[in-house]
Image (cartoon, coloured by chain):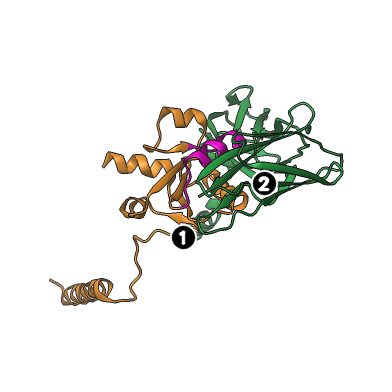
Amino acid sequence: MKIISLVLIICSPLLLQGQMQFQEIENQANYKFGDKEVRRIFKFKNDGDYPVTFNSITSSCGCTTTSLDKITYLPGEEGEIEAIFTIGQREGLQRKKITVLTDDSDNSRYEMILEVNIPKIAEINTRLLYWKKDESLDPKTITIDFQPNEPIKITDLKISNDSFNLDMDEVLTGKKYIISVDPGTARNSKNGNLLVKTDFPKDNPKIYFFHLRVQ
Amino acid sequence: MNPFIKESGLICLIALFLSLLTWSFHPGAPDYHKVELEDGEILLTTALQSTDLVLWVDARSKENFELDHIPGAILLNEDDWEYLLAEFMEKWDPDLKVIVYCDSRLCRASKNVAQRLQDELQINNIYTLHGGWETWTIEQKR
């Protein structure tokens, strides 16, 4: 009897695996410039001998939504969870956790990861040009280095305060631009916003915001 | 009473008394209530006790922000970064301590937003709120 109890205690974690078997718990989605969202499927199967009902599916980010065809799956039945990640203006490696809760008494909780790598369209040295009180009013520069292979044009520069003078130089055609910002000579505190419009991606061209401030 | 049980009980009581004494007065005793903070995180109590002026930044979704937010907070998330960044800059001042928060301890939005502010604007004095909005609401109910 003691041996049986000991074996049961040792093996109990193995017995608590749950019925739902997911094919992948980490899913890498491909992204291409201009995509507004990416979708990935998490396939699963009820490998047990009783029905399992999904109680909830939540994501660690409001930017990721999920959908499921139905909530109860019979033994042997297969299904899939579709995860939709809205890109917004995110950049870099994004890892979003999706937590699934079921009524399975053996293991009711499953966690999955949706991973998307969103490369930057441009490397930019700074978004803030700031002249401190004790600093000389020399022009400062913004460098925009576009990363995609195809040429990208800056189509418009819009500034909210005309007392800042702008000068743009296309250093590498369709690739690298330097914008020089001259705050003028008058030592008075002021600020302005600069909008840089591009022609990429074609269907949703990127606009960059910069802030200029003289203290 | 059985003398063995009596002696055992006494030894246990003495041991308990000594260990409590050590835990109370030992300078190197572990602090079981200490919260492990990640890099750049700040506790709500520290933020509220600070004499610095704070610019609260809400990195949650626009919908959640509109439902409720920390008084004076401004919305800045990566759903609409460029537009919201402009609004952030209207409020920002180098003397302000910027504290970014998202839903709870589990979300990463506040960390991402704080990192982008540091990378793109090269400004310092940026923190993320440990426990986020969840901690704020719990504190308000006390």
Instruction: Classify residue A37 by image quadrant.
Output: top right
Q: Secondary structure at mark 1?
A: helix
Residue A58 at what x, y percent from top left? 54, 34
Q: Which mark is residue A181?
A: 2
Residue placed furthest toward the front: A186
Please, which chain is the residue tagged with disc 1 on? Answer: A
Instruction: Determine the CA span between mark 2 and mark 1.
Output: 82 Å
Q: Please state which of residues A5 and A173 is positioned toward the viewer in this rendering.
A: A173
Check disc 2: other Cα within 10 Å, few if <14, some if 14-19, many if 20+.
some
Look at the image and give the residue range highlighted in magenta. Answer: B75-94
Q: Colour of chain A?
A: green
- Image depth: mark 2 or mark 1 in front: 2
Q: Is residue B19 left or right of residue A174?
A: left
Q: Please state which of residues B79 and A59 is positioned toward the viewer in this rendering.
A: B79
The three-letter code of the residue at mark 2 reads: Val
Residue corresponding to mark 1: A2
Q: Residue at x 70, y 30 (%)?
A: A36
Please, which chain is the residue tagged with disc 2 on? Answer: A
Q: Is residue A174 above or below residue B67?
A: below
Q: Which mark is residue B49?
A: none
Q: Is residue A196 left or right of residue A5?
A: right
Q: Secondary structure at mark 2?
A: strand
Residue A15 at what x, y percent from top left? 56, 47
Indicate yes or no whether the magenta region holds residue A171: no
Q: Please state which of residues A12 and A77 is positioned toward the viewer in this rendering.
A: A77
Determine if residue A115 is in view. no
Residue A69 at what x, y percent from top left? 64, 22
Instruction: Classify residue B7 by image quadrant.
Output: bottom left
